[in-house]
Amino acid sequence: MDYWIQRYQSSRPSMKMEIIEVDVPCNSKCLESTEFRSLLENETFRSRIEVVDSLVELVREQVRTLKREIQGRMGEFEGDLDSLTFTIYRLVEYGGNTSLGERLTFEGRTIASGSFQDLVNVNKLIERIRTDTDIKSICDEIRYLIEALWEHFEKNMVKIQ
């Protein structure tokens, strides 16, 4: 078991959080499909990974909340809602700009396509939504939860004996 714990600690397995595409530590479901699945048999490890599972689920719930809130503010949006949610999260937390041309894009993702005027209108909505205090609060909560997840991982998963 020591070999696998050392390998786990050095490789620090992670996964992408759905929609927002941010790296988070692997939860137990993720670990089941890796070389580290045998660690889940260790009771101490298992109890610590349960905290990771809970935090990952909290992040997922906040991402779903963000998506619902964005959808409610967009009305009859005829584009990719996941790409729109990704865009707004990234714009709020990291900054940047959308690209307006034949399509409305952000970091290579197509948010919407259509007439130029439709794309301009969608872009205006994005700008309004990204400055909305409720949306900013949800995005910040997601970021704080991810930071707490990595902090737990560093303190309790990387240093297990």
Image: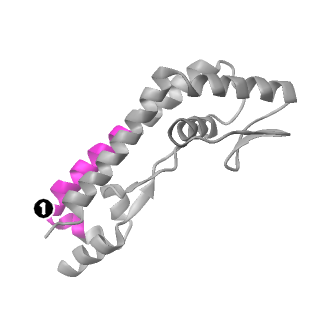
> Position of 47 compared to 18: left or right?
left
Determine whether 49 is above or below 78 in the image: below
Numbered circles on residues, count:
1
Q: Residue at x 22, y 81 (%)?
A: 3
Is residue 155 visible in this depiction of the protein? yes
Secondary structure character of the magenta stretch overall: helix
Q: Residue at x 55, y 41 (%)?
A: 90
Determine the image quadrant of residue 159: bottom left
Q: Quadrant of the C terminus?
A: bottom left
Q: Callout 1: few (<14), some (14-19), or many (20+) C-alpha neighbours within 10 Å?
A: few
Q: Residue at x 76, y 23 (%)?
A: 121
Q: Residue at x 34, y 63 (%)?
A: 31
Residue 54 forms part of the magenta stretch:
yes
The image position of residue 101, as x and y in percent, is 84, 39
Q: Quadrant of the N terminus?
A: bottom left
- In the image, 143 versus 84, the foreground residue is 143
Determine the image quadrant of residue 38: bottom left
Query: Residue type at mark 1?
Result: Thr
Is residue 61 visible in this depiction of the protein? no
The image position of residue 41, as x and y in percent, is 18, 66
The image position of residue 131, as x and y in percent, is 56, 24
Residue 9 forms part of the magenta stretch:
no
Q: How is the image coloured?
A: one colour
Q: To which residue does mark 1 refer?
A: 44
Q: Secondary structure at mark 1?
A: helix
Q: Residue furthest bottom?
A: 3
Magenta part of the protein: which range?
A: 39-59
Determine the image quadrant of residue 91: top right
> Position of 78 compared to 151: left or right?
right
The image position of residue 58, as x and y in percent, is 33, 38
